[in-house]
Image (spheres, helix red, strand yellow):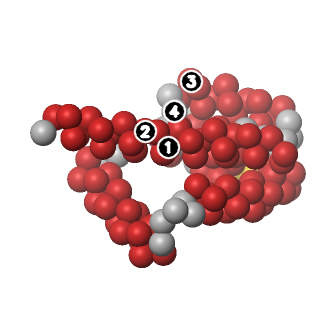
Amino acid sequence: MHGELQELGRAVKQAQYRQHRALDTALAAAGTTLAQWDALRAISRSPGASARELAVATFQTEQAFGALVGRLAAQGLVERRPGRGRRIEHYLTPAGELVLTAGHEIADEVLAACFTALTDTDRATLLGLLQRLTAEQNV
């Protein structure tokens, strides 16, 4: 049993690794990286969110996210504003919106290629199974 589970875990990791490498390579054309684009996506989904909230959303530590958002702010892609108390809120700038939009187009192409071996039904099934796994683990 453990051999099959380990093989399944490795296959998921291998697919993720291949997808991330392809995305990172292609996103370079938009002048960004996968980590940067993912941060822009998270900020776009939750404007005004704190670094802690955004770190959780991007699967990073708060410290790593803070360093990343510092680079994005230096590039003029993200704006940090004071919130209530000591809270710092994060927002995309117009330049950040442009990079995010370019990244969405690139990601759609890359992910279509990554999942081309699966039918629409297969992709829907895989998505449903992965959502069920992550919901059960509260990841």
Q: Residue at x 58, y 37 (%)?
A: 51
What amino acid type should be assigned to the residue bearing mark 4?
Gln
Q: Which residue is mark 4?
A: 60
Residue 15 x %, y %: 48, 45
Label 3: element kind: helix
Q: Are marks 2 and 4 in contact (CB under 8 Å)?
A: no
Q: Which residue is mark 1?
A: 16
Residue 92 x %, y %: 75, 51
Q: Earlier in the sequence, mark 4 or mark 1?
A: 1
Seen in the image, is 124 located left or right of residue 114?
left
Residue 5, visible in the rendered structure: yes
Q: Residue at x 51, y 33 (%)?
A: 60
**Real-space Cα separation, disc 1 to disc 2, in angstroms:** 5 Å
Q: Earlier in the sequence, mark 3 or mark 1?
A: 1
Q: Which mark is residue 13?
A: 2
Q: Earlier in the sequence, mark 2 or mark 4?
A: 2
Seen in the image, is 130 located left or right of residue 36?
left
Q: Earlier in the sequence, mark 3 or mark 2?
A: 2
**Real-space Cα separation, disc 3 to disc 2, in angstroms:** 25 Å
Q: Which residue is mark 3?
A: 63
Q: Are marks 1 and 2 in contact (CB under 8 Å)?
A: yes
Q: Nearer the viewer, mark 3 or mark 4?
A: 4
**Real-space Cα separation, disc 3 to disc 1, in angstroms:** 24 Å
